[in-house]
Each structure stands twice: as structure tokens, then as C-alpha cells.
């Protein structure tokens, strides 16, 4: 098993275990604890053996429709009926939406109890399970209501990806591509040179990919838990991505929207002369290599309405992540009008 730690100063650390079969240790790891398990219903049906008798289990249907204040209240009231106390543990077993809701409920219950994340999708394994961001959506925008509540432990079992539907796998892989373009050049090389094995879900290649993505994220989060500085780089592709999700009524998969946002971020970088032509070409080829194409966009006016309400906007300025090279990026303060001008040239 590969082990990582994320240790923000003056905050509890997160222990991350990556390896085939780690999910099957949960029953023994939680003995003696009062456990509330929020579980993706599909995962529960496929892996009933992981559900321990001493847990209180609530199964939910994953998806963006899960991330609402009404759903949070439903879970919190179930925790009340289960008599979860301050020493209790919330297990979030599922993809990013289950992890988001579970993490938020753990942060809110009795002003914060311990949370363990058990990601079961590519999206959650390479990104959302680590870092402590929890949130639900409003009609006005994505992830507008949330809290930072890092999990104490994360159990990453890549063997679960064998049964993941291809659209969900591709959606999650887009987050690894984001890290490769904006943060981690060695990961870029894995995805570029070993792309066929990545797409085929070769176990060894997957473990390397997940390890690189999580190591990069853990390093950034450890230096900036509250997203006041370098953690903003993890939002590469997300300004347009979140707007596209909102325009679609959250029917479009998060990762595919982020992938389209990566194309847009490269367009912005090109307009600002922030990248060399050769690096731009390599990044665009990587996106195409993994099937992320420059799909048509909604009208600029629709997109900008959501961009202006994005949580990365301060005083009318968007903190936009601009790629600057292979595995590097920076945050630039850009106005919605500047972004709109690039959108109009798409």
C-alpha cells in the first residue's frame, strides 16, 4: 500500500492509503466506534461485504441532485436518530457527491465530528476525497454553501475502478489531466506517454496516476488549506466548468465540464501570451488524446451570469487560473468582460 499524509499547519492531518483491497479493512478499522456510513446505493449493492454490522448505514443515490440543503437535513436527522455523539465517525463511501455531502454533514454535526472518505470513483480518488472541501449547491451556483473539514483518513482502492462506467471514468480522469497541465509535469508525462494504459485502466498505471495526482494535491493543501494562495491553482478549468454545469442544470458531468474549461483556460493563456506555442500544442493534444474535445459552448451571456457569481470572484474580479507551461500555472485577476472577449472568439 502507498501511504501519503497531508499535514496543514495547526490542523489535524489526513492519512491517505492507496492500494487494492484497502476498502475491505474498514470493518476492522472502525471497531469500537459509533459509525454513521453514508453509502452510494450502487456501491452498497455491489459490495455488501464491506458494510459492518456495527455501522448505521444510510444509502443514497449519487449525483449532483444529492448536493442540496434538503438532502443535508435528511442525513443530519438520520444521524440524530442514530445517536451519533462527538466521538462518532462519519464514513462517506462513494463518489464526489457522496463525499461532499458526507463531509459537510460531518462538519455540521455537533460542530464537527471525524470523517473518513472512501472514494469509489476516479473523480473522488484523484481529487475530491482529499482536501476537506465540502459543499452543496444552490440554484444560483455550484458549491456555494459549504465548509472546510479535512477527513482524518482516506481509503483509495483503485480496483473499484474496474466496474466504473466509462463516462464516469472519463469524467474523473479530467481532474488528473487538470493537475498534469497546471501543477505536476511528471503526471503530464504519464498521461502523455502511457495514455493508452491509462484509458485501458491498467492497474499499475492507474496506481501511479492516482498517486501523482494525490501527492500533488496533498502538497498544495498542506500549504494552503483555506484556499488563500496556491490552493487556488486546483481551480484550473473550473471557472468555465462550474458555469457550464450550472447552465445545464447540473446534468452535464463535472469532469467533462472541467475538461472544456481546460480548453478555455488554454485559450486565455494564449490571449495573454502566458504559454509558449509548443506547450499550448502539447496540452491541447493531451486533451484530445484522452477524448476531451472543444465542444460548442452556450451563449456568452448565459455563461458570464454564472461566472460573476462564482466563489472565486472578489470585488468583481475573477481569480482565474492561467496555465503557464507544462505542469505550471498562476492566478490572474481578470474581469468578466476580459473572459467574455475570449469566449466570443471561441
Image (cartoon, helix red, strand yellow):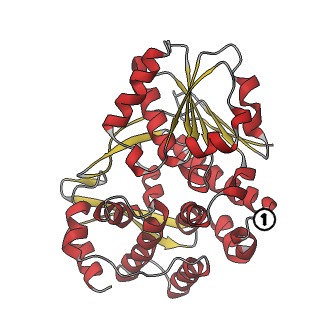
| Residue 108, percent from left and from top | 39, 25
Q: Residue 43 at x, y = what percent?
A: 63, 44
Query: Can residue 308 be seen by looking at this rendering?
Result: yes
271 or 290: nearer the viewer: 290
Q: Quadrant of the N terminus?
A: top right
Q: Viewer-proximal residue, 307 or 321?
A: 307
Count of picture labels: 1
Residue 295, relative to residue 16: is it above or below?
Answer: below
Taking the image as shown, residue 148 lies to the left or right of residue 205, namely left
Left or right position of 296 against 24: left
Res 338 quadrant in image: bottom left
Q: Of all residues shown, which one is farthest toward the front?
A: 45
Residue indicated by mark 1: 202
Tag 1's secondary structure? loop
Looking at the picture, does residue 79 appear above or below residue 329?
above
Residue 228 appears in the picture as rendered: no
Q: Position of residue 328 (x, y in %)?
A: 53, 66
> Which residue shows up at 57% across the image and 78% down it?
291
* Frontmost residue, 147 versus 257: 257
Q: Quadrant of residue 81?
A: top left
Q: Is residue 79 left or right of residue 49?
A: left
How far across and down, in percent of the image, does residue 125 sit?
A: 62, 50
Amino acid at each position: 500500500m502507498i501511504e501519503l499524509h497531508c499535514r496543514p499547519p495547526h490542523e489535524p492531518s489526513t492519512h491517505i492509503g492507496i492500494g487494492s483491497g484497502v476498502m475491505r479493512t474498514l470493518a476492522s478499522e472502525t471497531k469500537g466506534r459509533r459509525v454513521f456510513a453514508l453509502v452510494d446505493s450502487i456501491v452498497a449493492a455491489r459490495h455488501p461485504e464491506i458494510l459492518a454490522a456495527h455501522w448505521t448505514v444510510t444509502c443514497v443515490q449519487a449525483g449532483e441532485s444529492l448536493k442540496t440543503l434538503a438532502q443535508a437535513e435528511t442525513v443530519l436527522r438520520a444521524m440524530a436518530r442514530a445517536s451519533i455523539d462527538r466521538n462518532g465517525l462519519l464514513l462517506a463511501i462513494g463518489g464526489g457527491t457522496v463525499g461532499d455531502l458526507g463531509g459537510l454533514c460531518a462538519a455540521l454535526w455537533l460542530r464537527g465530528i471525524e470523517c473518513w472518505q472512501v472514494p469509489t470513483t476516479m473523480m473522488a480518488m484523484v481529487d475530491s476525497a482529499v482536501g476537506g472541501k465540502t459543499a452543496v449547491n444552490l440554484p444560483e451556483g455550484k458549491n456555494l454553501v459549504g465548509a472546510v473539514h479535512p477527513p482524518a483518513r482516506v481509503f483509495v482502492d483503485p480496483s473499484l475502478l474496474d466496474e466504473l462506467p466509462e463516462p464516469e471514468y472519463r469524467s474523473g480522469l479530467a481532474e488528473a489531466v487538470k493537475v498534469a497541465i497546471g501543477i505536476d509535469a511528471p503526471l503530464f508525462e504519464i498521461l502523455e506517454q502511457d495514455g493508452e494504459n491509462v484509458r485501458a485502466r491498467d492497474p499499475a498505471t492507474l496506481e501511479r496516476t492516482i498517486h501523482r495526482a494525490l501527492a500533488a494535491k496533498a502538497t498544495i493543501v498542506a500549504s494552503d488549506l483555506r484556499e488563500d494562495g496556491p490552493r487556488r491553482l486546483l481551480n484550473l478549468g473550473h471557472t468555465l466548468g462550474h458555469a457550464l454545469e450550472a447552465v445545464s442544470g447540473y446534468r452535464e458531468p463535472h469532469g467533462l465540464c472541467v475538461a472544456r474549461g481546460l480548453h478555455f483556460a488554454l485559450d486565455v493563456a494564449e490571449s495573454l501570451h502566458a504559454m509558449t506555442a509548443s506547450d499550448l500544442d502539447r496540452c491541447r493534444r493531451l486533451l484530445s488524446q484522452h477524448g476531451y474535445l472543444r465542444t460548442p459552448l452556450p451563449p456568452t451571456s448565459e455563461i458570464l451570469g454564472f461566472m460573476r457569481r462564482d466563489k472565486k470572484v472578489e470585488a468583481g474580479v475573477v481569480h482565474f487560473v492561467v496555465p503557464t507551461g507544462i505542469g505550471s500555472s498562476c492566478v490572474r485577476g481578470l474581469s468578466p468582460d476580459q473572459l467574455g472577449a475570449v469566449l466570443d472568439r471561441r
